[in-house]
Amino acid sequence: MRKLSLYITKEIINPLNNELKEYYDIEVNTSNKSLSAEELKEKIKDKDALISMLSDPLKREVLSNAKKLKIISQYAVGYDNIDLEYANKRGIIITNTPDVLTETTADTAWALILSVSRRICEADQYVKKGLWDEGWGPKLLLGRDVHSKTIGIIGFGRIGQAVARRAAGFNMKILYYSRNRRINLEKELKAEYADLSTLLKEADYVTIHTPLTEQTYHLLGEREFKMMKKTAYIINTSRGKVIDEKALIKALKEGWISGAGLDVYSNEPVEKDNPLLKMDNVVLTPHIGSASVETRTRMAEVVAGNLLAFAKGLTPPNRVV
């Protein structure tokens, strides 16, 4: 049996590697550096299959050079980095990893909510740098409560719902905004539907869990940030370009809002001169929403399972197109 050729754009935890090797000759990018479009074009030009990351620019220019490519197994839930229309026209199968990272990403959103509201990163550095030399103080590093506040969830899919379940434990009022109202979930999650303007005006914490589409690109800009409370915080673990980053920087500098917790950005990695890097009221993480050993291992199992099904002539279980 002729093995298929497989390229993996970054090393992953892969418990099914031996099974994959039965069906595929595997080449892996062992550096931690993301490949450019030109590098990808060269690497996949003669490959049958690809394991891709969300950071890989798989647009028409790149895919058109991969004449043999039959399947892309995306190591992510999202796939806005892939030209789906062109892939579908070419008959290239696209798969993803749904359901696997829901709870872990919701945990990350909550880590950011608590970190930015209670100034955890500032406090950590305050102690480690030896600045804590006067003992306990009534005004030392005052933050804001999370419990009993109002949380506004933009996007009420699996991750948004998981965030809402956690919010209930903090006795929060839960507002959500979504393209489709989820009436069947409102009673279960004690969540109220609100239009975007109402949510922004009332929420103490606004957390984003929507995919990046033409409709959600720069969903939050100057107009929206000016609607928010001056004491409110914005949290983003979805896609960086849902927020107009220049508008966010202005909102933070001018005090329209109190702070932000960000795991995603307009450009990744973040440019060294990005003003966000110097702001004490911003907590930044390097796109690690799903970065737990358990979740990344499960993602690899799903990615490999999609490829194994394809190699065996079966329909991959997580086919997108």
Image (cartoon, rainbow, N blue to C red):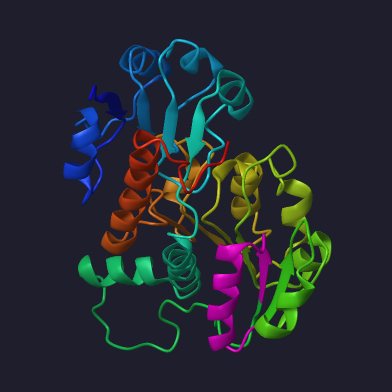
Please identify the quadrant where the C terminus is shown: top right
Q: Does 306 appear above or below 60?
A: below
The answer to whether residue 270 shows anywhere in this view is no
Residue 224 at what x, y percent from top left? 76, 53
Residue 139 at what x, y percent from top left? 45, 83
**5 or 274, which lies in front?**
5
Report whether 271 appears left or right of 226: left
For the point 28% across and 35% down, which residue is it? Answer: 10
Q: Does 248 appear above or below 59?
A: below
In which image quadrant can residue 40 be found? Answer: top left
Q: Does 85 appear above or below 198?
A: above
For the point 57% across and 36% down, which residue is it? Answer: 80
Residue 233 at what x, y percent from top left? 60, 65
For the point 66% across and 66% down, which residue is it? Answer: 153
Magenta span contains residue 44: no
Residue 93 at what x, y percent from top left? 50, 31
**276 or 96, which lies in front?**
96
For the point 55% across and 52% down, which residue is it? Answer: 238
Stretch of the chain drawn in magenta: 151-172
Report whether 257 appears left or right of 313: right
The answer to whether residue 149 shows anywhere in this view is yes
In which image quadrant can residue 170 be found? Answer: bottom right
